[in-house]
Image (tube, rainbow, N blue to C red):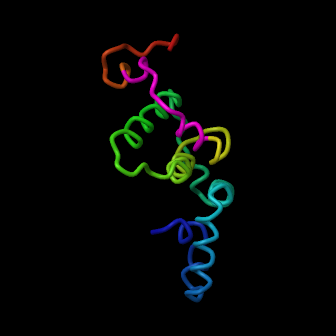
Amino acid sequence: MDVCSLGYGDYYRKMPGAYRKFIRKYMEHDRECERCYIRKYTVRGDLLYSPFRPELLLELVKLVEFTDRETPPSSLEIASCLLMGFDYPGSVRGLASHLREAGHSAEAVLVLAGKREVTDEF
């Protein structure tokens, strides 16, 4: 099931194909608009998860999604997906630029590998 079906429900499914295509393309084109609509007008906005260590989650995503790939994924698409499920402040473009930043912190990689204990001073 795609985002438009979740957002518009039966109304979307009953639309003619050309209208459904237009709405889907519009929502995919403007990811910030899509995120705002889904969070504000659908039940998905109430189901956001607030991560315990958001900076560590972002390091994990950067490590898994942007390392050792022939073709790097779209940082806008990954940021949009993260903002659909997790309660992060900021915009899609802001999170995407953060994800594109080069390198990983050595401390975060050690924590993710289980070689260092997570403490409050992290």
- Residue positioned 53% across, 31% down in the render: 54
Task: Give the quadrant of the N terminus.
Answer: bottom left
Q: Residue furthest front?
A: 70
Return the residue nearer the eye: 108 or 72: 72
Circle count: 0
- Location of residue 21 in the rendering, given as x and y in whole percent from the top left corner: 57, 79
Depicted 42 relative to depicted 59: above or below: below
Depicted 117 relative to depicted 44: above or below: above
- Residue positioned 55% across, 87% down in the render: 17
| Majority SS type along the magenta span | helix
Q: Is residue 102 magenta?
A: yes
Q: Is residue 32 magenta?
A: no
Return the residue nearer the eye: 29 or 7: 29
- Location of residue 15 in the rendering, given as x and y in whole percent from the top left corner: 60, 85
Q: Residue furthest top?
A: 121
Depicted 44 relative to depicted 113: above or below: below
- Residue positioned 46% across, 31% down in the render: 59
Depicted 27 relative to depicted 39: above or below: below
Residue range corresponding to the magenta coloring: 95-109
- Location of residue 12 in the rendering, given as x and y in whole percent from the top left corner: 59, 78
For this view, does 45 lie left or right of residue 112?
A: right
Return the residue nearer the eye: 77 or 52: 77
- Residue positioned 58% across, 36% down in the render: 98
- Location of residue 69 in the rendering, given as x and y in whole percent from the top left corner: 35, 46
